[in-house]
Amino acid sequence: MKMTRRGFLGSAAGFAAVGGGLPCRGGTGSVYRGVPIGVITYSYRSMPVGKGKSLEYVLASGIGTVELMSNDVEIDAGAPMNKLPWKMSKDERDAFVAWRLKADINRYAEVRARYDAAGVTVHIVRFEDVGARWLSDAEMDYRFKVARAMGAGAITREIPDSKDLPGWWETEGRRLAAFAEKWGVNIAFHNHLQINATTYDGPLLGYSKRFMINYDIGHFTATNDTDPLDIVRKYHDRIASIHIKDRTSKAHGQKHVPFGKGDTPLAGLFALMVKEGWNFPCDIELEYAIPKDSDPVREVNASREYCKGKIG
């Protein structure tokens, strides 16, 4: 299997130094009029990797709720890695998998305690390969144990191919649903450009009450001409979280751009959530090119401030 990068806090609360010295804008405060603005730690992928680094970046961005990439939480728990998983050699990946099967889950409780103490909630952990047929039962259990230990309500992964959902259900989905039920942790399916307005009208969500949506509204905007908010209106009770980014439409080149520069209806999303009282996390996913005089922490913070301003 080819390894790819995908495969593997609001108001200021003081400026105490965190970890390596980034200013801390605090946790707990990034909920505006009931709308939680969070971040997926994938946004910090170009920053130095190390124990405690992800929490440092989250705090410096003013964020209080987070979707943790599996490698970020595993580094915090003592995993033998000093680079991102998709940059590892085969031998390094093999050693990493062996470490997972022997890992002390109590270490994750310690990691969670550090997030709790900082006022940061972990609502999701991302294990891209969860449910893959090549994973042993022990490897599957490990993924759910980590999510449970971190207090996460869901694990995110990519949505299966809609062209053969019955086949996927028989070969992988049924087993995945059973593990989700066993551990009481939902599976939230993430989209890139492969979904449209009717994708979730199919059988996927009906297979299991544990199957939820991790809706990337920016990617949807980039590839569809229909209103991106229709999915939110129709499936709000099955949405675990939303990835927020700004992208331009097909007509405008499908570009990744800073918040407020594209066609994604972020202001409309927030207005709808406030009106309806929906409070699923909206996680910033930073994918546009970082200016040379900036860094991901500054850009996530600026994106959070944009969202705060639009929510009012």
Image: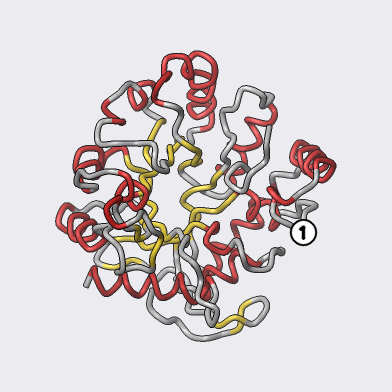
Judge the density around disc 1: few (<14), some (14-19), many (≥20) Cα neighbours within 10 Å: few
- 264 vs 169, left or right, is left
Which residue is at a point 79% across and 42% down the rendered structure image? 99
Nearest the eye: 72 or 91: 91
Residue, far left: 275
Q: Is residue 153 above or below residue 136?
A: below
State the quadrant of the C terminus.
bottom left
Nearest the eye: 287 or 310: 287
Which residue is at a point 30% across and 23% down the rendered structure image? 202
Q: Is residue 60 above or below residue 5?
A: below
- 147 vs 38, left or right, is right
Nearest the eye: 201 or 311: 201
- The residue labelled by disc 1 is 82
Which residue is at a point 16% across and 52% down the rendered structure image? 276
Q: Is residue 237 above or below residue 164?
A: below
- 78 vs 263, left or right, is right
**Image quarter for residue 129?**
top right
Residue, far bottom: 15
Which residue is at a point 57% across and 33% down the rendered structure image? 130
Q: Residue 145: image x %, image y %?
A: 61, 38
Q: Residue 268: image x %, image y %?
A: 19, 59
Q: At label 1, which amino acid type do we have?
A: Asn
